Amino acid sequence: MKESQAWIGVPLPANDGRARALAEAKKLTLKTSGGNLVCHHWGPLQKGPERTPLVLLHGGSGSWTHWIRNVLHLSQERSVVAMDLPGMGESDLPPNARDADDLPTTLLEGMDQLFPAQVVDVMGFSFGALTAGFLAAVAPQRLKRLVLVGTPGLVAREEAPRLRGLTAAMGREEICAVMHHNLRVMMLAHDESIDPATLEIQRANVSRDRLRKRRLASGDALSALIPQWACEVHSIWGSLDTLYLNMKKSPFDLWAGCDHQSETVIENAGHWVMYEASEAFHRAVDGILVD
């Protein structure tokens, strides 16, 4: 779709999977009580004999493009919908929304329009995983599986990554330098994982973040929700995820109280593991999303 490709601002080779994902994305704008909820989908939406639909929730200061290297693989045998979380990407910011616990109502209204009376699998990355945890607690009957990728909110962080900010006076080169720094200290473990398109994805996503005062991801809010989940739960991490490199207590020991089926650590990958190590990530997910 030309509309989806235009904003990325960087030419992509025809054989780049990101270009195909952009070209094949079908954009939907759903009307909810929290305003417009924008989604992109791949595959059929109607209920039928296909496998359980998969809803993707991206990370903080992101959009559906956090999943740009994954949607084509994930949609080979199922409907896949990647939502722009309320207040990020192209989705409206609901009145009075401040953090992940304010978003499930809007997301459920969107899910009801896309997949009425149908259970779905939900995969959340980072802030999207935190949001997915609240969603699973509010509407446990709607989720078949919960897949949590690079999950925050399990234990309080002792020290946050040192991110750099932007100013109105910065030129394009300075902005790109800030994006590169922030990607390296927070999202990706290797310089070679960052190309011009990655920088532009980051820049475009950060510029549209209107949910800026969120705080729950730095604490342990998710751990209190775990006993309320009724679906099976899976977790995936990059071995070099900066959120947990310096933790004194491992987050992997905190799943008591839910049906935690599997935990996968993908070696030599950072926080944005499904982007930096997409092939290994797909192998892990293929073993999880089995109907």
Image: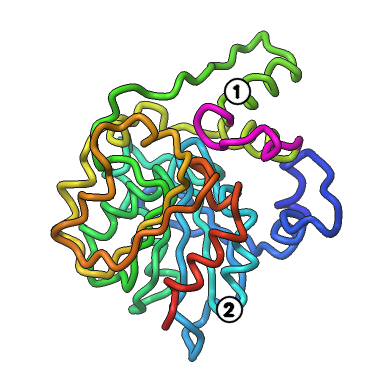
Neighbour tally class for label 1: few under 14, some 14-19, many 20 plus, Cα within 10 Å:
some
Q: Amino acid at mark 2?
A: Pro
* Residue under label 2: 44
Q: Residue at x 49, y 59 (%)?
A: 30
Q: Is residue 57 left or right of residue 3?
A: left
Upstream in sequence: badge 2 or badge 1: 2
Q: Is residue 257 left or right of residue 156?
A: left
In the image, 287 versus 2, the foreground residue is: 287
Q: Position of residue 131 (x, y in %)?
A: 33, 49
Neighbour tally class for label 2: few under 14, some 14-19, many 20 plus, Cα within 10 Å:
some
Residue 141 vertical position relative to residue 269 in the rendered view, above or below = below
* Residue under label 1: 181
Q: Residue at x 37, y 50 (%)?
A: 129
- The colour scheme used here is rainbow
Q: Position of residue 211 (x, y in %)?
A: 41, 33
Residue 290 vertical position relative to residue 273 in the rendered view, above or below = below
